[in-house]
Image (cartoon, grey):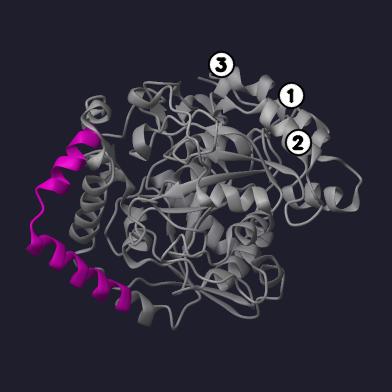
Amino acid sequence: MRPDTSFSGPDLCALSATEAVGLLRRGEVSATELVEASLTRIAQVEPSVNATVTICADRAREAALSAKGTDLGGLPIGIKDLTPVAGVLTTMGTKALKRNYPLASDPLVLRLEERGAIVMGKTNTPEMGAGGNTFNAVFGMTRNPWDTARNAGGSSGGAAVSLATGEVWLSHGSDLAGSLRTPASFCGVVGFRPSPGVAGGGSAAMGFANEGLQGPMARNVADCTLFLDAMAGFDPVWPLSMPAPATPYATVAAQDPGRIRVAFAPDLGGFAPVEGDIAQVLSDAMTRVQGPDCTVEDACPALPDLERTYRALRAFYWAALPGRAPDFVQEFYKPTLAQNIAEGRALCAEDIVNAQLSRSALYDRMRRFLTDFDVLACPVTGIGPGPVEEEFPRSVAGVPTGDYIDWLRFSFLATTTTLPSMSLPAGFTPDGLPVGLQLIGRPRGEARLLQVAQHIETALALPTTPIDPITRSSAGH
């Protein structure tokens, strides 16, 4: 059960994004009112959580005056501090960029603003988005609202916290090793990693890369689909982008899903260790969703060379992007990021060839496996949020971690195979911390994945309203 919580923010901030957009479209609330409510809530909670590290008050107020009642209709959102917004401080969490004010916005930001989103601010991220704990030398640590002594996950930690506390109704994130999924799990919200090209592009500098992707974060599945629809569509600036679906994701997700078959792999066939409290929450959730129209079966395909393949792809990605930054930027990099870049530079042609061949074989295994199941369900992480000061856990379920991404093993599969995946709230540990269930869908199977997620969310019936941050003392520590 969800622990008893309170919410002392403006009533408008407690609405779902879908409800708020409905009010905007009917003219029952103005974009200006939502902007002011968001600013009030940000001022209330930021001293406790440090989620929205750059606030665009004047910019948002100006945008609200011309907001139109279509698409998102003037809804305030957060943008992750890896993604440029014209004229707004964009640090990427690194000291070399602490005074960086880009002249142009990322194409996805432009699309969202054209479709009625209002940028309220930039949400915190670890340096260059590297790591599963959101902290950096520019803004410091983002704290988990369910226990401010714990971390919020990463790298979209600020985004997840901004949602969980009601600062904004939707928040943008990105994902390479669970950067949407881990903070969503840790903070009790929804994080969706789409297939490449569904939600804009990845890096502008390496447009054909499909490992690091942007995606929506929200407090429930319906809001997540609303946000995904606002992101979707072809644009030639993104070489991998695809047309939006003929039927919006939000429409499909709300339809009767029919019979659902879920494959449950609590440790991905022995690939990753899991703490007992996490395993119990997910097992209980799977029991609760079973019924005449939803069957759950313990099953997992063989995943040979998954770790080696993912690590090679990741290292190549880091060497090609932050590893190409000017020396005056790289000299500030934290040791774990510098280590990943060095691993990428050490790769040889044989390593890249083997990774691509293995990746294709893993994709084919998953494609065939998912002909018998709608989704593969597994943990998001094998451990809950640790102390906010700890960069990464040194062990999971008694198994030592080798480095700062070893504990994020459950994220490797979807990234390597380019399958859509998401974190969906599944319950709480005995000490009151959220646990997310990861759902991995079929190739280009966003619509069905969201439909299944909507069914599971309804079956679990967990509250999705925002909370006041729970401080260390009130959390019982």
| Residue where numbered disc 1 is placed | 40
Viewer-proximal residue, 82 or 334? 82
Q: CA distance from mark 2 to mark 1?
A: 9 Å
Question: Disc 3 on helix, strand or loop?
Answer: loop
Q: Are marks 2 and 1 in contact (CB under 8 Å)?
A: yes
Q: Is residue 362 magenta?
A: yes
| Residue where numbered disc 3 is placed | 473
Question: Disc 2 on helix, strand or loop?
Answer: helix
Amino acid type, mark 1: Thr
| Residue segment shown in magenta | 336-364
Q: Are marks 3 and 2 in contact (CB under 8 Å)?
A: no
| Residue where numbered disc 2 is placed | 13
Amino acid type, mark 2: Cys
Task: Categorize mark 1 by other alpha carbons within 10 Å: few (<14), some (14-19), many (20+).
Answer: some
Question: Disc 1 on helix, strand or loop?
Answer: helix
Labels 2 and 1: the sequence-earlier one? 2
Task: Categorize mark 3 by other alpha carbons within 10 Å: few (<14), some (14-19), many (20+).
Answer: few
Q: Residue at x 80, y 37 (%)?
A: 65
Q: Residue at x 48, y 27 (%)?
A: 142
Q: CA distance from mark 1 to mark 3?
A: 25 Å
Q: Is residue 52 above or below residue 76?
A: above
Q: CA distance from mark 3 to mark 2?
A: 26 Å
Q: Is residue 88 above or below residue 403?
A: above
